[in-house]
């Protein structure tokens, strides 16, 4: 990934803020983060670092040796980091999803996840109020628990989860259902179930990596998008590319689409509050969003 860092201040005090995952070639998160770090005079620079599965213990030693203050995480490390941290936010531990760690002045590590915040903030920014909504969730991976939690807290009425592996979706829903004030349903993956759930829902949340840059595999059947009501909103969680095949299909249908970029930028308010005690302004949010839209050559 090519990074543009001329606008960043760089001196001997500058700390590295790695975002770790595997693979990382597709990751554009550092662009958004660096926009906010510069705007708030934080002398840290984020860049992507590939850490393979099993590499977290070595990485944690490096964090200590280098005296890092923060690091961020993406797939596949969001759950595996939890046992290696001194303190984890209870919800993030319950949903097995940490994507930011701060190291305090005593060297203690504190982890928290922000995907649920980002998802809901993207909806809010697009003026979508989920209160009373019936939602179709595609996928049942690490982000889905926290997304369901935030949708339920915002008053969503019902979510139907359809996932490639029925058992994984069932396990997730069984785990979260008693803690969420929302009707939850799991349906086996089939054209018929996708069609039916899409025709009844107000919002489709696409939470699988199908269509993601560098990922082998895309939606073989998208006919369910044709079954959706004209007012149904589609939220695609994939950041790169923004216009996945599912998004293109939804746009062809004239449906309102919310991009993964909006979710990625959306989590920064809470993430900055947690990591640095900094309040990001709406102007900074708008500037970062514009920057990312330009980077991906999208109209804002
Ligand atoms: N915009 C943002 O800020 C943001 C933040 C975090 C994540 N994301 C995106 O969210 C997506 C999901 O992330 P995650 O951490 O939840 O991933 P994950 O834990 O790896 O889960 C992936 C989910 O997708 C399903 N899946 C994978 N490949 C599939 C295929 N070929 N066909 C059908 N289903 C398939 C899996 O089904 P099985 O259960 O059958 O394996 C699983 O439910 C990723 O695309 C990621 O880029 C976006």
Image: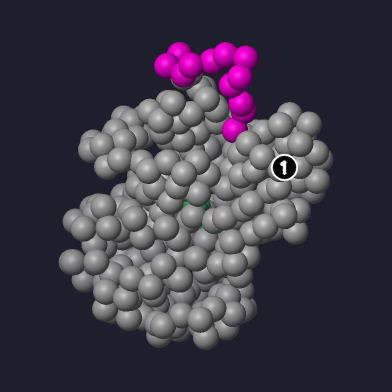
Vertical order, 90 against 22 (above or below): below
Compared across the picture, whether 114 is left or right of 75 comes to left
Q: Quadrant of residue 41?
A: top left
- Point out residue 248 in the picture as x, y percentages from the top left corner: 31, 50
Q: Nearer the viewer, residue 274 or 243?
A: 274
Q: Residue at x 49, y 55 (%)?
A: 114
The residues colored magenta run: 6-17
Q: Residue at x 46, y 75 (%)?
A: 161
Quadrant position of the C terminus in the picture: top left
Q: Disc 1 marks which residue?
A: 107
- Point out residue 58 in the picture as x, y percentages from the top left corner: 81, 40
- Name, please, the residue furthest toward the front: 106
Vertical order, 64 against 138 (above or below): above
Compared across the picture, whether 167 is left or right of 39 comes to right
Compared across the picture, whether 232 is left or right of 262 comes to left
Q: Residue at x 63, y 36 (%)?
A: 69
Q: How is the image coloured?
A: one colour
Q: Secondary structure at mark 1?
A: loop
Quadrant position of the N terminus in the picture: top right
Main secondary-structure element of the magenta-colored stretch: loop
Report the label total: 1
Q: Nearer the viewer, residue 117 or 241?
A: 117
Q: Residues within 10 Å of mark 1 (few under 14, many from 20)?
A: some
Q: Is mark 1 within 8 Å of ligand 1?
A: no
Whether residue 238 is visible to the viewer of this picture, yes or no, is: no
Q: Residue at x 64, y 59 (%)?
A: 88
């Amino acid at each position: 990934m090519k990074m543009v860092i001329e606008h960043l201040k760089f001196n001997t005090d500058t700390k590295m803020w790695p975002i770790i995952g595997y693979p990382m070639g597709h990751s554009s998160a550092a662009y958004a983060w660096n926009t906010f770090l510069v705007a708030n005079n934080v002398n840290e620079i984020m860049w992507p670092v590939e850490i393979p599965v099993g590499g977290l213990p070595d990485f944690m030693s490096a964090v200590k040796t280098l005296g890092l203050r923060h690091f961020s995480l993406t797939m596949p490390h969001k759950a595996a980091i939890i046992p290696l941290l001194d303190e984890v936010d209870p919800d993030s531990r319950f949903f097995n999803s940490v994507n930011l760690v701060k190291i305090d002045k005593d060297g203690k590590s504190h982890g928290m996840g922000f995907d649920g915040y980002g998802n809901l903030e993207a909806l809010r920014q697009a003026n979508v109020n989920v209160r009373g909504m019936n939602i179709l969730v595609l996928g049942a991976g690490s982000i889905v628990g926290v997304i369901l939690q935030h949708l339920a807290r915002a008053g969503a009425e019902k979510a139907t989860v359809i996932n490639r592996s029925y058992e994984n979706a069932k396990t997730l829903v069984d785990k979260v259902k008693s803690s969420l004030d929302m009707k939850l349903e799991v349906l086996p993956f089939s054209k018929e179930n996708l069609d039916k759930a899409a025709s009844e829902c107000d919002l489709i949340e696409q939470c699988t990596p199908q269509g993601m840059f560098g990922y082998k595999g895309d939606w073989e059947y998208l006919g369910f998008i044709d079954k959706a009501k004209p007012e149904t909103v589609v939220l695609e969680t994939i950041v790169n590319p923004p216009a996945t095949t599912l998004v293109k299909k939804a746009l062809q249908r004239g449906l309102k689409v919310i991009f993964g970029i909006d979710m990625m930028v959306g989590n920064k308010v809470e993430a900055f509050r947690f990591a640095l005690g900094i309040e990001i302004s709406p102007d900074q949010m708008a500037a970062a969003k514009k920057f990312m839209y330009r980077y991906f050559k999208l109209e804002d």
